[in-house]
Image (spheres, grey):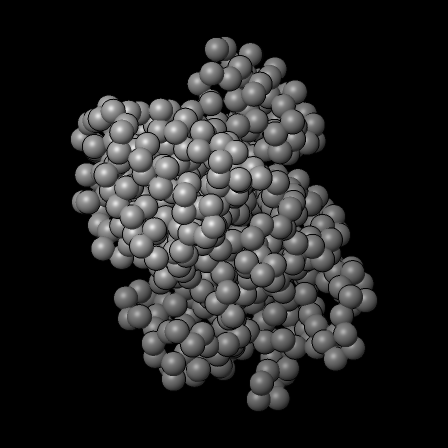
């Protein structure tokens, strides 16, 4: 496949990353001057540790970045920007050294000691956690800390530009603020020379070209000092716009909760002589009750929790579709995400290029090493046993299930030892998922009415089944009983529901032929005997 073929196909793709890339390419036309790389940015507030929202924003931005490269063949960069000059507003409950942090409230995060006592500041600790987090998933990015840019003077010219347009920015922002907030609002926030706190006070611009400002400090004294070299920082919406312009950001997405920020920051960017970058506004995650996920409520699902019950690539797969639609994020979505990922992965090799570009696995394979999809070392293009079937098997084994005995069943079913790393990983995930979500909810009921006769008939058929009966033969046996007028099932769905509820203890279940082949004929007959004994 040539670059020309790839580019031409990308131009017509309806997949959302290509739609975003096409908008950006239309704006940039022939790329950036002098062949400069197109700049994608994602922002991070380092007052807390990176979480699933951080992952999805970097991943989705990477989807668009790779789509843009395929579309244009132009060089790109991705910057992960940490706003570590932000003042600490409140002390998180889950951190050590609470008293020390309380004493440092209001100071820039990069100038507060690390409560974990490992790094030179609280921000340095959390920035390190961010980089470790992004490296863990193999993202290709450049890390930029606001403190480095402010303190080194890199942002000085941009800050002078803000001061020169101070009143223009006030004209944009003041109408959006409550009267009380407007009374103290200033685009630039000086850092107190006495306390080191980021001040929310009115500021007078004395000399914009020199970066000189005047304000009243916390002790009531009038201070005249430079806003340059890390002695001040900008308000969030102004900072957003300033770094867009100063760094030449071409693409940045953000959540629906920052819609107003994007509007106001876009206006400020134009005042500063630049433009708002391209980017989409994505919907936020919801919990299983459809409520917005809140870190303070703890009603979401963490990266660590997902990876206990699922895989990196299944999380990426779940995040890929429809970024403008809200997604429920809870443990119940994991099994389907895993099986759907493998279904799309198996389909990929047989698809023409235009269909591949709409396949989430195509995008995951290009996002980073962790989500490499079909090219993952040691992983096959198909799974010998779907995750849903593993869950059904492990639910029968109950809390006594282990990766070892589950692997034995799978090896007996497939006729080969379990050596595929992808399958080994999913067996571990299935045991964990069963332990925490399946086993505690199972309740096998007694068969009722004609169900007793139908189960007895199934047991007799299984007893007479040839030793080498495969899943199709076993499935046919199950079907024939369900279809027989002798047992009076109105439809097959009622028969299968009876099997699931009496043998497995759940309302839904697997393709029974595959389950019986995996679990074994004699163990299945034992399940039937236990059900009839009820």
Q: Is residue 132 left or right of residue 293?
A: left
Quadrant housing residue 135: top left
Of 356 and 145, nearer the camera is: 356
Q: Is residue 22 left or right of residue 392?
A: right
Q: Position of residue 84 (x, y in %)?
A: 48, 62
Q: Position of residue 392 (x, y in %)?
A: 36, 45
Look at the picture and state if 119 lies above or below 201: above
Look at the picture and state if 353 lies above or below 291: above
Look at the picture and state if 441 lies above or below 497: below
Q: Position of residue 167 (x, y in %)?
A: 77, 63
Q: Residue at x 56, y 12 (%)?
A: 4
Q: Residue at x 41, y 47 (%)?
A: 452
Look at the picture and state if 503 lies above or below 534: above
Q: Residue at x 58, y 50 (%)?
A: 327
Toward the bottom, the furthest residue is: 219
Camera sees residue 192 = yes
Q: Quadrant of the C terminus?
A: bottom left
Q: Residue at x 38, y 84 (%)?
A: 99
Q: Is residue 82 left or right of residue 119?
A: right
Of 400 and 246, nearer the camera is: 400
Camera sees residue 148 = no
Quadrant housing residue 187: bottom right
Of 277 and 338, nearer the camera is: 338
How many callouts does the rendering have?
0
Q: Position of residue 50 (x, y in %)?
A: 43, 57
Quadrant housing residue 211: bottom right
Toward the front, the furthest residue is: 486
């Amino acid at each position: 496949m040539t670059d020309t073929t790839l580019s031409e196909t990308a131009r017509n793709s309806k997949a959302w990353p290509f739609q975003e890339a096409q908008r950006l390419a239309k704006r940039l036309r022939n790329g950036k001057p002098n062949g400069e790389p197109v700049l994608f940015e994602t922002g991070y507030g380092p007052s807390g540790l990176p979480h699933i929202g951080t992952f999805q924003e970097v991943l989705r931005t990477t989807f668009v970045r790779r789509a843009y490269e395929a579309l244009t063949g132009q060089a790109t960069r991705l910057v992960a920007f940490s706003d570590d000059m932000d003042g600490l507003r409140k002390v998180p409950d889950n951190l050590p050294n609470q008293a020390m942090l309380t004493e440092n409230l209001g100071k820039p995060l990069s100038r507060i000691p690390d409560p974990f006592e490992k790094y030179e500041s609280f921000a340095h600790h959390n920035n390190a956690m961010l980089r470790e987090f992004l490296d863990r998933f193999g993202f290709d990015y450049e890390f930029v800390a606001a403190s480095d840019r402010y303190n080194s003077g890199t942002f000085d010219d941009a800050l002078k530009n803000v001061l020169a347009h101070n009143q223009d920015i006030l004209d944009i922002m003041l109408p959006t603020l409550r009267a009380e907030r407007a009374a103290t609002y200033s685009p630039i926030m000086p850092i107190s020379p006495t306390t080191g706190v980021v001040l929310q006070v009115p500021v007078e611009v004395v000399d914009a070209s020199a970066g000189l400002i005047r304000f009243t400090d916390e002790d009531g004294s009038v201070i005249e000092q430079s806003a340059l070299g890390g002695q001040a920082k900008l308000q969030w919406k102004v900072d957003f716009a300033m770094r867009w312009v100063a760094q030449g950001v071409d693409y940045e997405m953000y959540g629906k909760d920052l819609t107003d920020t994007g509007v106001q920051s876009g206006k400020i960017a134009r005042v500063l002589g630049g433009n708002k970058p391209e980017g989409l506004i994505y919907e936020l995650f919801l919990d299983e009750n459809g409520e917005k996920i809140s870190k303070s409520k703890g009603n979401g699902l963490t990266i660590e929790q997902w990876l206990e019950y699922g895989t990196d690539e299944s999380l990426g797969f779940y995040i890929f579709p429809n970024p403008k639609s809200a997604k429920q994020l809870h443990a119940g979505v994991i099994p389907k995400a895993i099986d759907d990922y493998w279904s799309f992965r198996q389909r990929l090799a047989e698809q023409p290029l235009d269909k591949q570009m709409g396949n989430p696995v195509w995008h995951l394979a290009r996002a980073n090493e962790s989500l490499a999809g079909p090219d993952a070392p040691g992983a096959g293009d198909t799974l010998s046993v779907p995750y849903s079937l593993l869950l059904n098997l492990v639910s029968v084994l109950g809390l006594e299930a282990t990766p070892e005995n589950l692997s034995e069943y799978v090896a007996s079913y497939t006729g080969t030892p379990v050596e595929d790393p992808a399958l080994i990983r999913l067996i571990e995930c299935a045991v964990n998922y069963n332990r925490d979500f399946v086993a505690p909810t199972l309740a096998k009921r007694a068969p009722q009415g004609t169900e007793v006769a139908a189960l007895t008939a199934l047991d007799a058929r299984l007893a007479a089944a040839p030793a080498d009966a495969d899943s199709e033969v076993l499935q046919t046996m199950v079907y024939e009983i369900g279809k027989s007028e002798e047992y009076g099932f109105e439809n097959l769905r009622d028969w299968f529901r009876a099997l699931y509820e009496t043998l497995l203890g759940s309302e839904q279940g697997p393709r029974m032929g595959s389950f019986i082949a995996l679990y074994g004929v004699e163990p299945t007959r034992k399940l039937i005997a236990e059900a009839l004994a009820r």
